[in-house]
Amino acid sequence: MQTYDRLEAAFPGGSEPAAVAVQADDVRAPAVQAGIDALKAKAATTPGLGQPVTVTTNPDNTLAIVDIPLAGNGTDAVSEAALARLREDVIPQTMAASGAEVNVTGMTAGSKDFNDTMKSHLPLVFGLVLGMTFLLLLVTFRSIVIPAVAIMLNLLSVAASYGVLKLVFQDGHGEGLLGFESIGGVTSWLPLFLFVILFGLSMDYHVFILSRIREAVDRGLSTGDAVFQGVRQTAGVVTSAAVVMVAVFAIFATLSAIEFKQMGVGLAVAILIDATIVRAVLLPATMKLLGEANWYLPRRLGWLPRVRHEGSVESVGSQA
């Protein structure tokens, strides 16, 4: 990285150009060539598109790549605006009559398309994870309150992780401590990745704690006493697991690659907050306040199968 930084300082360059892929049976056909020539001429007079514009043709003459430099650093708003003008104005005005199939790729286009795809699929991923979580907890604990509370607490942990990432890596707080230079944002794939991983990890020991509480309730304890006993029984295991995960994830925060550093900080902070504040304080406090309402199940859902927990009266009786 030090050598790369020295090369960039000594020989500064621009962003990678946009690659306009022109595909046709024969790109040497007059109509296609006229479109490419018009594309080059239009690019020369369009703000945000630079020079030189180069054309490369494959040996079969079925594909021509027109490289057009874009303003900006390749991923900023300036580059995206130039890409939009290329796609929405320049190409339709110059290549529409050519009969060729025209697409745009390159670093800026790839980054923009990837981000757009991620955004469009976020509701699907969030809906799938939250829906499956609710259904599994509903069947396991025969309650609509337990899964609702679990989802809210898990979302709180994820939101705390997002907040820390924004504070550190977007706003630049703690650059000296973590040894990085802020790029003004968080890598695009990380929020969705963190959501899925953190939800899975959080639900692991969340179900572990709830199972001990449910076992105590099945043995006849009140919900308040069951919460106290369940948290006390699981505190050591949950704390030990959290310490191991935080230590492992913190190692990623020491790496030089900014993406892995962001991932390590996000995961470590989220697990730390989840194991201390959320599971040790908010979960038992919420269940204590709700009392017997924790186990509320509408009558129309009474047909749900019953899952026997290890410490329940039914389980003990069946083993005997």
Image: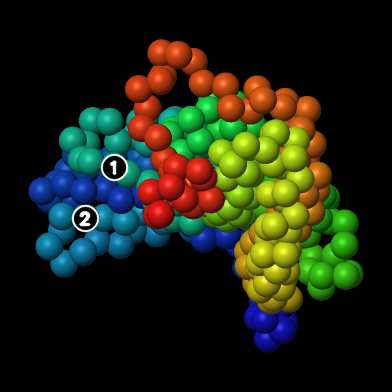
Q: Residue 221: in sight, yes or no?
A: yes
In the rendered view, would you say 176 is above or below 46?
below
SS at mark 1? strand
Q: Amino acid at mark 1?
A: Val
For the C terminus, give its image quadrant.
bottom left
Asked whether the beta carbons under mark 2 and mark 1 sit within 8 Å of each other, the answer is no
Q: Nearer the viewer, residue 162 or 3?
A: 162
Q: Residue 109: in sight, yes or no?
A: no
Q: Residue at x 67, y 64 (%)?
A: 237
Q: Amino acid at mark 2?
A: Leu
SS at mark 2? strand
Left or right relative to 263: residue 308: left
Left or right relative to 281: residue 151: left
Left or right relative to 94: residue 266: right
Residue 309 position, x and y percent, is 48, 47
In the rendered view, would you say 76 is above or below 298?
below
Q: Residue at x 79, y 36 (%)?
A: 285
Q: Nearer the viewer, residue 298 or 173?
A: 298
Q: Residue at x 58, y 27 (%)?
A: 295
Question: Mark 2 highlights which residue?
Answer: 63
Question: Mark 1 highlights which residue?
Answer: 102
Badge 2 or badge 1: first in the primary sequence: 2
Q: Nearer the viewer, residue 42 or 5?
A: 5
